[in-house]
C-alpha cells in the first residue's frame, strides 16, 4: 500500500517474508525436529484458513511479499490447495511456497500447482532407506522420491532439496544427494544442525559446517563459483558448478545471517515470532478471536518486529534455547 511505512526493526532490517505453519503434526519423526512421542495442539487451537489469510493480508499491506507454508508437515492439513489459492490472491504477495517432507507430494502436487503454488522445498537427508529411517525414524523414502518425480511432471519452476548436516550421521549422504540433485535438476541446500530438536540432544560438536561440506564437494566433484543474488535476505549462500548444478549452504550456526534476516513467523496456533530462536511470541490468535480489527493486528505485527534482537546468539554464552521445538514453531 502506497505510503505505508515498511516493517523495519531497530537495526534497519526490512521484513518482506512470512513463514506460516499450518500444522504441528507430521508423519515423520526426524531427530532434529520432533520427539518420537510428540504432543500436538488440539484442532480448535490452530488458525483457520480464513484467519491465516487475514494475517497474510495485513502483513502484505505492511510490505510482506513472500509466504512459505510449513509445519509440521503442511500437506497433512486438509484442503491445503484451498489455502494456497486464498494466499495467492492476496494483493501484494509475489510468491507462495511450501516446505514439505514429500511423503504426500505425489498425491497433491497437481492440486498445489493448479492452486498457484510457485515453489517447493522438499526435506530429504538421505537417499538410502537405512539412512532415511535413521534420521526420520519412519520409512518412506520411496514415497518422497515418487513425490519429487510428480512435482517435476507438474512443471514447478524450482524444486529445492533441504538436507540437514549432522556430524557422525549424514557425512555418507552428502555426495549421493549432490549427484542426485545435479542429475535431476534440483537445487540442493545443506543446512547446519540447529538447537531446535525437541529432545534437546543438540551439541555444538554435532554441527557439520557448511564450509566442511563445501570443501568435500569441491574436492570430489569440482570447483564451485559463487552466485550473485538479488535477495539480500536470502539465508543461503548459493554456488554453481561450471558444468551444471547448484548447491547452497545455510550456515545458521557457524556463520549466522542475522544481519540480513527479513522474515517473520506465524505458528500453527497463531503466535507471531520475529526469530526462529525467539523466546517471546505475540498472540495473534487471541486478537483475531476477540474481535480485534486490522489496526490492532497491524500494531501487533509492528510491535513484534520492533522487538527483534540483533542476533539469535547461538555462538554466544548467553544463548537461550526457545521453549518450543522446530515442529512447534514451523520450519
Image: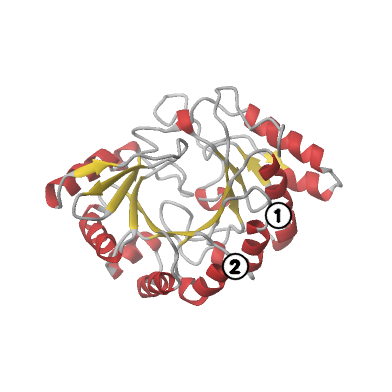
Q: Which residue is mark 1?
A: 53
Residue nearer the viewer, 319 or 83 = 83
Question: Which image quarter holds the N terminus?
Answer: top right
Residue 197, given in percent of the width and then of the height, sits at 45, 48
At x 58% / y 35%, what residue is drawn?
279
Residue 320 lies, with reference to residue 132, above or below; the image says above
**Total number of numbered discs in the rendering:** 2
Q: Is residue 305 visible?
A: yes
Residue 159 lies, with reference to residue 110, above or below; the image says above
Q: CA distance from mark 1 to mark 2?
A: 15 Å
Residue 253, given in percent of the width and then of the height, sits at 37, 36
Q: Secondary structure at mark 1?
A: helix
Horizontal side of 307 relative to 293 (left or right) equals: left
Q: Which residue is mark 2?
A: 115
At x 64% / y 39%, what residue is drawn?
63
Q: Residues within 10 Å of mark 1 (few under 14, many from 20)?
A: many
Q: Is residue 209 visible?
A: no
Amino acid at each position: 500500500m502506497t505510503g505505508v511505512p515498511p516493517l523495519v526493526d531497530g537495526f534497519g532490517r526490512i521484513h518482506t517474508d512470512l513463514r506460516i505453519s499450518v500444522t504441528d503434526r507430521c508423519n515423520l519423526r526426524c531427530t532434529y525436529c520432533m520427539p518420537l512421542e510428540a504432543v500436538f495442539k488440539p484442532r480448535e487451537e490452530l488458525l483457520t484458513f480464513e484467519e491465516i489469510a487475514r494475517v497474510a493480508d495485513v502483513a502484505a499491506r505492511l510490505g510482506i511479499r513472500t509466504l512459505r507454508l510449513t509445519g509440521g508437515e503442511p500437506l497433512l492439513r486438509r484442503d491445503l490447495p484451498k489455502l494456497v489459492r486464498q494466499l495467492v490472491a492476496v494483493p501484494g504477495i509475489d510468491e507462495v511456497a511450501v516446505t514439505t517432507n514429500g511423503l504426500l507430494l505425489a498425491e497433491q502436487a497437481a492440486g498445489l500447482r493448479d492452486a498457484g503454488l510457485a515453489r517447493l522445498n522438499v526435506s530429504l537427508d538421505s537417499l538410502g532407506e537405512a539412512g532415511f529411517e535413521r534420521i526420520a525414524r519412519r520409512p518412506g523414502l520411496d514415497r518422497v522420491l515418487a513425490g519429487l518425480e510428480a512435482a517435476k511432471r507438474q512443471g514447478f519452476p524450482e524444486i529445492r532439496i533441504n538436507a540437514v548436516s549432522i556430524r557422525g550421521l549424514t557425512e555418507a549422504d552428502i555426495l549421493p544427494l549432490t549427484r542426485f540433485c545435479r542429475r535431476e535438476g534440483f537445487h540442493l541446500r545443506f543446512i547446519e544442525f540447529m538447537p531446535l530438536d525437541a529432545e534437546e540432544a543438540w551439541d555444538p560438536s554435532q554441527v557439520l559446517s557448511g564450509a566442511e561440506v563445501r570443501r568435500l564437494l569441491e574436492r570430489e566433484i569440482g570447483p564451485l563459483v559463487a552466485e550473485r543474488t538479488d535477495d539480500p535476505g536470502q539465508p543461503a549462500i548459493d554456488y554453481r558448478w561450471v558444468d551444471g548444478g547448484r548447491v547452497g549452504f545455510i550456515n545458521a550456526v557457524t556463520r549466522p545471517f542475522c544481519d540480513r534476516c527479513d522474515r517473520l513467523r506465524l505458528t500453527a496456533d497463531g503466535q507471531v515470532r520475529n526469530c526462529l530462536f525467539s523466546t517471546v511470541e505475540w498472540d495473534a490468535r487471541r486478537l483475531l478471536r476477540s474481535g480485534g480489527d486490522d489496526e490492532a493486528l497491524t500494531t501487533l505485527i509492528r510491535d513484534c518486529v520492533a522487538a527483534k534482537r540483533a542476533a539469535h546468539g547461538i555462538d554466544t554464552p548467553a544463548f537461550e534455547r526457545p521453549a518450543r521445538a522446530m515442529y512447534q514453531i514451523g520450519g
